[in-house]
Amino acid sequence: MIATTLIVLLALLALAVPVAAALGVLGLVLDQIYGRFPLSLAMGELAWSTSNSFLLVAIPFFVLLGEILLRSGIAERMYSALVQWMPWLPGGLMHSNIVACGMFAATSGSSVATAATIGTVALGEVERRGYNERLFLGTIAAGGTLGILIPPSINMIVYGVLTETSIPQLYLAGLLPGILLTVLFSLTVMVACLLRPDLDGTRVPTSWEGRLRSLPDLLPPLLIFAAVIGSIYAGLATATESAALGVIAAMAVAAWHGRLTLEVLRAALEGTMRTTAMIMAILIAAYFLNFVMTSIGLTAQVNRAITSLGLSPYELLLVVIVFYIVLGMFMETLSMMVATVPIIAPVLVTAGFDPVWVGILIILLMETAMITPPVGINLYVVQGLRKRGRIDDVMIGVAPFVLTLVLMIAVLVVWPDLALWLPRSVATAG
């Protein structure tokens, strides 16, 4: 049964069938082969119950928030301000790419949106400043992955819904690892440019007057982050309500800059509808697949197979990490998450790991999958923005950051309090 599932899934993905369709077809195939009664009759009810979750309403809000920041030019102003502050470091504007991704991640909740937005405003600097193109592209693809780790995060919402884990706790748990990973990405650039000075580009001329003048352009993302996250922990809003508050804050900032036009709103709403439709199609198909796998006993069979291995908790954890890294090479991250978390997370929690910590670990593994060839989605996002050359350049440029993510995963395993200290401290204070 397990072999049949993997063969059918890999065959569908190899045929370039869209992910949502592949998951749905896999569910139908398993239903026809192993189902004792037509499980497909439950598809309508599953589609309704999946899309009717109050927490999932936050997804289109966060997507819309990022779209408004991009379409109104706020993200471009933020990047231009960071350019004034980063050129003194070895690697110059490549640090601006990473920090800008981190700041945009603190408002958008999406890795793809983060990579696409910062890539749009940054790629023109490669030839203008003489940077090594591969490493420059790698900073955008890797920096974009911060979108699902630094709160607010769409993937954290999905994990919370799948495992009934507190979204505010997950948001707190992702904050320190997100900051540390941003620093590690910058250190990766710095070390690369110190070892290979030819990777660096020409410095952007700056002055303290220009830096101070640019400070107001760095405030909007921080204010929106404070509005979204602060409203949750002040007890003023739920995760979904805070997402709506973030949209209002983004519209207010856009209006302040005189960029809240009907054209901007139309483009932002169109982008939001496309992205939300894609996410919901994947979620509905994956929920149906999970329902079929549970009904035919595949989930229980996988759990028995894992338990029968007789592994210690950390040996089991190593198997899970390798499993996700390998699967991430062939499967889109959101669908992989929805299809596997209901099976993997309970096994790890039963082995004694904290469900919040497990969530952050899985998010880091999803980040790794986003930049791991051949299916890493951020690789294709950055190559699509580049519109020339081969995707091999992006793959080579992102390789050092894959190693950095593996290091970050090791740090989280060795030091679990990196993720758990902040949630515990807030819970104790409360």
Image (cartoon, helix red, strand yellow):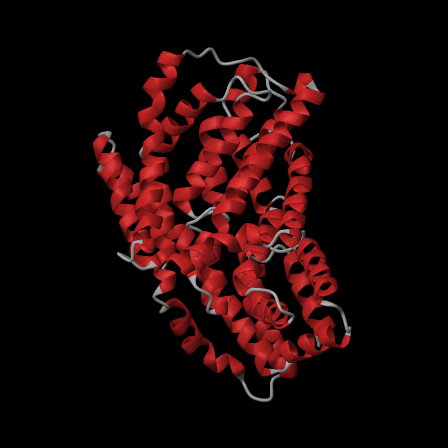
The x, y position of residue 424, in whole percent, is 47, 58
Identify which residue, 394 or 193, lies in the foreground: 193
Q: Quadrant of the C terminus?
A: bottom left
Residue at (64, 36) in percent of width and height:
398
Residue at (60, 76) in percent of width and height:
293
The x, y position of residue 226, in whole percent, is 33, 43
Identify which residue, 300 or 123, lies in the foreground: 300
Q: Eyeballing the image, is 306 above or below 15?
A: below
Q: Quadrant of residue 333?
A: bottom right
Residue at (72, 75) in percent of width and height:
307
Residue at (51, 44) in percent of width and height:
178
Q: Is residue 237 left or right of residue 180?
A: left
Q: Is residue 210 left or right of residue 16?
A: left
The x, y position of residue 377, in whole percent, is 57, 46
Q: How many callouts does the rendering have? A: 0
Q: Is residue 223 visible?
A: yes
The x, y position of residue 181, in whole percent, is 57, 41
